[in-house]
């Protein structure tokens, strides 16, 4: 059945909105490295619902509503235009920090700067690194880590002109081609699968509910009623009071703080059934409680249920006498992978991907028939452009990506499998993030870990292993701010709006400009202060760990233990049972995507928020029904607005002080 939105009059988005969104995204990209890294303030860009875009969106929404009310005039920006501006800023902020720029320069230079006689990188890794991928001048690398002479005293424009660009031109060209090609493939993939997820499956997108509610209120001239709602104001008051007190405590220690972190680990034994909880922490973030309330109860229940179940598994295995050493993992690239039990996620991701393909089988068949000109394209479409372009564009883009790897020295089979693994993991992660309302998400195992578990380490000998680890670190392992979920959100917000090509072109141009601005801002920051003096410990540590693993992969005959394959098969079996029960049994209370986050470090922070949000949602629906839910959801929307409002306020305070209060997790 054709989407009912097609029968409605499309909302016209003016060029001014797209241009404004582009400019604001670039500004965020220019400011984010300085704010997040040098000032250590509340991250402007971070997660899949970043602070700066929403704070600016909130100010713009209230501003245009006030101007229209005071002067009795038309809205300077309509509600749909505000959403377009917001999603462009979100796309840009994802590139500006962990999604790309945070580790990019370190990734390119770490094998040279951190090479020592002890780690033998110079003998093993250096001959395998294609010269085109790293700066050619050792002095350029040294200055990146130490800073330019008198860099702190120089103006930013002077720093930019003093950067040794000649050493960076070639690697920047090669990596820009790689990155933009990956982004283009992501755009094509979303254009293909968006109809299935958004229209056919009617997938719930919790992270969009708050900006959509504000946009709708502004567009209907109901902003005053919306922001004066007593439930909303009560929700806003909670985080405002919490962060006002705690923020003042940072600057005036005599003011008592309200604790938002509780160490529950000491209450659990290190041995026995509850041994998996001896490091348990309880974080209180009002915004994440709000997102959890807006998420489907089945999903929010599954998140905390599987997190606690994973903790119990460690204790159960211990009681049964199975103490599996971490050495069984062999060589892994997962950002948080620490124990063989966590390799369940490899099998689970694979089965869930096949489940998504099976759900979309009719849609994908229809796309294939259209792409091979067996079937005509429908006269009315909901995508940005014809799916035939996306189909052949995605295949051609992946082919070019494989050629890029082969040209630089990777084996053709490895290149083909690696590219497939990259985008398979990205599609599954996008489903988890968008449907689960996860503003903060991290992978457990990396795509290369799945290939090693299934095919062994022979695929990654020589340059193949180095290129795989290096490129994976650029885009496909740190998914706290990955672009693909934002593209799905963009596709949802763009539907029913015209002109489609203007919206798509503005988004594509925003991504390209944001990438350029992020690289420029990061290079200027590093050459001004030096990486040594900046707070880049996480980026440096995770990147050097990647190269240590690459060295082990190339120089040693490390073998993955049989427990890795066993747990991967267990994960596949558990996921198979979950998807069958979820699809066939209408009363089944558990959603499969909860299992995919069981070992994610993000869930260590968010599990309590999802428990509280789920409990409030369940109690509300049981004792108050839908009428109570509609009223009470404004309270939880207020929690989100209040948290981000205070985050923006303290971020601005942090720009003018030596230390800053952090509202949201980094």
Image (spheres, rainbow, N blue to C red):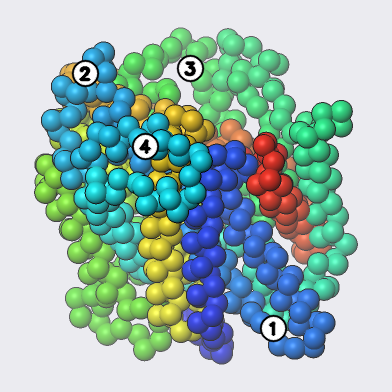
Mark in front: 2 vs 3: 2
For this rendering, which residue is in front, 142 or 646? 142
Please give the residue where the numbered disc 4 appears in the rendered image: 144
Give the CA distance from mark 1 to mark 4.
47 Å
Mark in front: 4 vs 2: 4
Does label 1 or label 4 sit earlier along the sequence? 1
Q: For numbered disc 2, what is the local secondary structure?
A: loop
Does label 3 or label 4 sit earlier along the sequence? 4
Q: Is residue 281 left or right of residue 192?
A: right
Q: Position of residue 342 (x, y in %)?
A: 43, 29
Count the marks.
4
Q: Position of residue 260 (x, y in %)?
A: 74, 34
Please give the residue where the numbered disc 2 appears in the rendered image: 120
Q: Assess whether mark 4 and mark 3 are in contact (beta carbons under 8 angstroms).
A: no
Q: Is residue 401 left or right of residue 260?
A: left
Q: Is residue 261 visible?
A: yes
For this rendering, which residue is in front, 307 or 540? 540
Does label 2 or label 3 sit earlier along the sequence? 2
Around disc 2, counting alpha carbons within 10 Å, would you say few (fewer than 14), some (14 to 19), or many (20 or more)? few
Please give the residue where the numbered disc 1 appears in the rendered image: 75
Mark in front: 3 vs 4: 4
Q: Residue at x 20, y 64 (%)?
A: 396
Q: Is residue 628 left or right of residue 415?
A: right
Q: Residue at x 35, y 41 (%)?
A: 105
The quarter of the rendered structure image containing the C terminus is top right
Q: Assess whether mark 1 and mark 3 are in contact (beta carbons under 8 angstroms).
A: no
Q: For numbered disc 4, what is the local secondary structure?
A: helix
Q: Which mark is residue 317?
A: 3
Q: Is residue 304 left or right of residue 355?
A: right
């Amino acid at each position: 059945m054709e989407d009912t939105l097609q029968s409605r009059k499309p909302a016209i988005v003016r060029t001014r909105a797209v241009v404004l969104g582009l400019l604001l995204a670039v500004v965020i990209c220019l400011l984010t490295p300085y704010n997040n890294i040098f000032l250590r303030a509340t991250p402007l860009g971070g997660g899949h619902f970043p602070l700066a875009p929403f704070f600016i969106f909130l100010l713009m929404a209230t501003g245009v509503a006030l101007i229209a009310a005071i002067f009795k005039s038309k809205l300077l920006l309509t509600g749909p235009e505000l959403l377009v501006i917001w999603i462009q800023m979100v796309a840009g902020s994802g590139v500006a920090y962990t999604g790309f720029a945070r580790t990019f320069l370190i990734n390119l230079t770490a094998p040279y700067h951190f090479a020592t006689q002890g780690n033998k990188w110079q003998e093993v890794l250096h001959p395998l690194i294609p010269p085109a991928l790293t700066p050619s001048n050792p002095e350029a690398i040294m200055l990146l880590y130490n800073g330019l002479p008198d860099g702190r005293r120089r103006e930013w424009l002077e720093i930019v002109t003093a950067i040794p660009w000649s050493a960076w031109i070639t690697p920047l060209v090669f990596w820009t081609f790689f990155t933009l090609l990956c982004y283009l493939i992501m755009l094509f993939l979303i254009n293909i699968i968006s109809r299935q997820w958004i229209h056919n499956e009617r997938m719930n997108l919790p992270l969009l509910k708050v900006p959509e509610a504000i946009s709708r209120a502004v567009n209907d001239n109901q902003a005053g009623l919306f922001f004066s709602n007593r439930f909303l104001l009560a929700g806003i008051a909670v985080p405002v009071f919490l962060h006002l007190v705690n923020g003042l405590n940072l600057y005036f220690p005599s003011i008592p703080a309200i604790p938002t972190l509780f160490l529950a680990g000491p209450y659990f034994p290190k041995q026995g059934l509850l041994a998996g909880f001896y490091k348990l922490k309880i974080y209180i973030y009002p915004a994440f409680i709000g997102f959890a309330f807006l998420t489907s109860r089945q999903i929010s229940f599954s998140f905390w249920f599987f997190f606690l179940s994973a903790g119990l598994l460690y204790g159960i295995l211990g009681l049964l006498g199975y103490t599996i050493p971490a050495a069984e993992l062999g060589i892994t690239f997962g950002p948080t992978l620490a124990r063989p039990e966590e390799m369940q996620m490899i099998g689970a991701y694979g089965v869930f991907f096949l489940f998504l393909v099976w759900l979309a089988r009719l849609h994908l068949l229809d796309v294939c028939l259209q792409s091979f000109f067996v079937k005509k394209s429908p006269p009315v479409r909901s995508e940005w452009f014809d799916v035939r372009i996306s189909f052949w564009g995605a295949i051609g883009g992946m082919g070019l990506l494989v050629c890029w790897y082969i040209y630089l020295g990777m084996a053709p089979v490895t290149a083909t499998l690696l590219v497939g693994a990259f985008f398979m993991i990205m599609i599954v992660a996008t489903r988890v993030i968008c449907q689960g309302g996860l503003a903060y998400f991290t992978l457990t195992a990396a795509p290369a870990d799945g290939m090693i578990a299934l095919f062994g380490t022979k695929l990654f000998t020589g340059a193949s292993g180095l290129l795989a680890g290096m490129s994976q670190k650029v885009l496909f392992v740190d998914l706290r701010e990955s672009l693909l979920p934002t593209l799905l959100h963009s596709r949802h917000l763009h539907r029913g709006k015209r002109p489609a090509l203007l919206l798509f072109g503005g988004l594509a141009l925003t991504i390209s400009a944001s990438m350029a601005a992020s690289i420029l801002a990061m290079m200027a920051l590093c050459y001004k202060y030096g990486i040594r003096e900046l707070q880049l410990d996480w980026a440096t540590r995770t990147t050097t760990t990647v190269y240590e693993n690459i060295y082990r992969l190339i120089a040693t005959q490390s073998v993955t233990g049989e427990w890795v394959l066993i747990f991967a098969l267990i994960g596949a079996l558990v996921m198979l049972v979950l998807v069958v029960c979820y699809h066939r049994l209408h009363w089944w209370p558990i959603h499969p995507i909860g299992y995919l986050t069981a070992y994610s470090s993000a869930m260590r922070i968010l599990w309590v928020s999802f428990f509280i949000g789920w409990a409030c949602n369940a109690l509300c629906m049981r004792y108050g029904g839908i009428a109570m839910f509609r009223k009470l959801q404004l309270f939880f929307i207020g929690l989100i607005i209040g948290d981000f409002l205070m985050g923006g306020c303290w971020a601005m305070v942090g720009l003018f002080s030596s230390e800053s209060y952090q509202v949201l997790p980094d």
